[in-house]
């Protein structure tokens, strides 16, 4: 099975900047994007929603959108800032879906800083397809480093599980493992022992979509992946992804993609054949 990036991903980057200071204290205005700040040097206190964290050299601070935050540093320091918004599965917040913590100690500091400076170099290029491609690639490197470094101790996992955000992250993981089941809102709410109405409110607040909308997006993403394998029949894909039969899958797929699964599979064959032809031609000329 090949690796694909079929999940709809929309990234907007608003700022890429290296900042040095002797001391620092400010309160940010609410912004419509995340502020991701890597501490190269120094120690910082940051307060958001009444909770204070301390970040030191090698840590990344993640400040959420639409919420003011305060930063205080009494000693000289240096930060690498990125302001971005990233949605996957159409309208799902990537940072929340990945359950990234507010403070993340980076495992490979040298690699993170190198990726940041690649991002900064790309950001400063003139507007072009090259700028967009290099910026996107470098930003993905940073996000991959955040996910890789976003580990919890056993004690932190217990505390996180007690909070709604951590429990909802477990629900999303369970959805991915149970796509083949005919899940209902009640089934999902039972996993966290919440009333279905309360569960739906908390889920939408966290991810911007309802639980069933999220489940539909995850199922459709898996359908697209499985359609790449010609050995998977539509009946098998329907069963593996929680659809009653191939006819129901066909209807849902057409509503989402404006083509049938069969038409999509044909388009994949055409794309792969075209790519193979071009690649062989280029190889022959070298």
Image: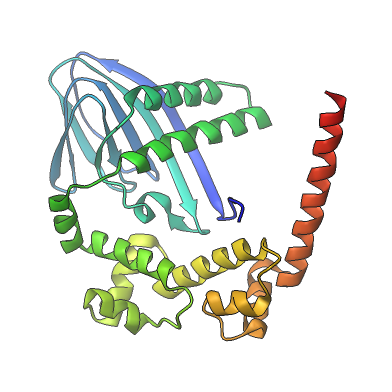
Colour scheme of the picture: rainbow
Q: Residue 256's image quarter?
A: bottom right
Q: Residue at x 60, y 55 (%)?
A: 6
Q: Residue 53's image quarter?
A: top left
Q: Residue at x 31, y 61 (%)?
A: 169
Q: Residue 191's image quarter?
A: bottom left
Q: Residue at x 83, y 39 (%)?
A: 278
Quarter of the figure that contains the C terminus? top right
Image position of 246 with respect to 124: above or below: below
Asked whether residue 128 is in view, the answer is: no
* Position in image of residue 32 (x %, y %): 39, 45
Quarter of the figure that contains the N terminus? bottom right
Image position of 247 with respect to 16: above or below: below
Q: Residue furthest front?
A: 231
* Position in image of residue 251 (x %, y %): 66, 80
Q: Residue at x 49, y 66 (%)?
A: 218
Name the foreground residue: 142 vs 202: 142
Name the foreground residue: 116 vs 274: 274
Image position of 214 with respect to 59: above or below: below
Q: Is residue 92 left or right of residue 153?
A: right
Q: Is residue 223 left or right of residue 92?
A: right
* Position in image of residue 145 (x %, y %): 38, 36
Asked whether residue 9 is in view, the answer is: yes
Name the foreground residue: 36 vs 59: 59
* Position in image of residue 171 (x %, y %): 33, 68
Image position of 91 with respect to 200: above or below: above
**So how many labels did they put on this image?**
0
Q: Is residue 54 left or right of residue 180?
A: left
């Amino acid at each position: 099975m090949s690796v694909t990036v079929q999940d709809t991903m929309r990234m907007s980057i608003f700022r890429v900047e290296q900042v040095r200071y002797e001391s620092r204290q400010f309160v940010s205005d609410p912004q419509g994007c995340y502020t991701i700040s890597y501490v190269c040097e120094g120690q910082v206190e940051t307060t958001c929603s009444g909770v204070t964290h301390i970040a030191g050299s090698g840590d990344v601070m993640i400040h959420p959108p639409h919420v003011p935050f305060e930063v205080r540093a009494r000693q000289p320091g240096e930060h690498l800032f990125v302001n971005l918004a990233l949605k996957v599965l159409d309208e799902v917040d990537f940072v929340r879906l990945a359950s990234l913590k507010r403070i993340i100690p980076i495992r490979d500091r040298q690699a993170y800083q190198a990726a940041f400076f690649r991002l900064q170099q790309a950001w400063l290029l003139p507007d072009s397809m090259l700028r967009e491609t290099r910026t996107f690639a470098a930003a993905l490197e940073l996000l991959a480093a955040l996910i890789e470094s976003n580990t919890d101790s056993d004690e932190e996992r217990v505390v996180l599980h007690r909070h709604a955000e951590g429990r909802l992250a477990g629900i999303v993981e369970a959805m991915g493992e149970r796509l083949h089941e005919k899940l209902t809102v009640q089934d999902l709410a039972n996993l966290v022992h919440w009333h279905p109405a309360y569960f739906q409110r908390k889920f939408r607040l966290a991810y911007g979509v309802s639980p069933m909308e999220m489940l539909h997006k995850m199922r459709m993403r898996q359908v697209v992946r499985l359609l790449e394998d010609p050995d998977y029949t539509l009946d098998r894909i329907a069963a593996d992804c929680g659809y009653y039969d191939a006819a129901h899958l066909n209807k849902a797929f057409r509503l989402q993609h404006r083509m049938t699964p069969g038409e999509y599979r044909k388009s994949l064959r055409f794309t792969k054949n075209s790519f193979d032809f071009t690649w062989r031609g280029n190889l022959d000329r070298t």
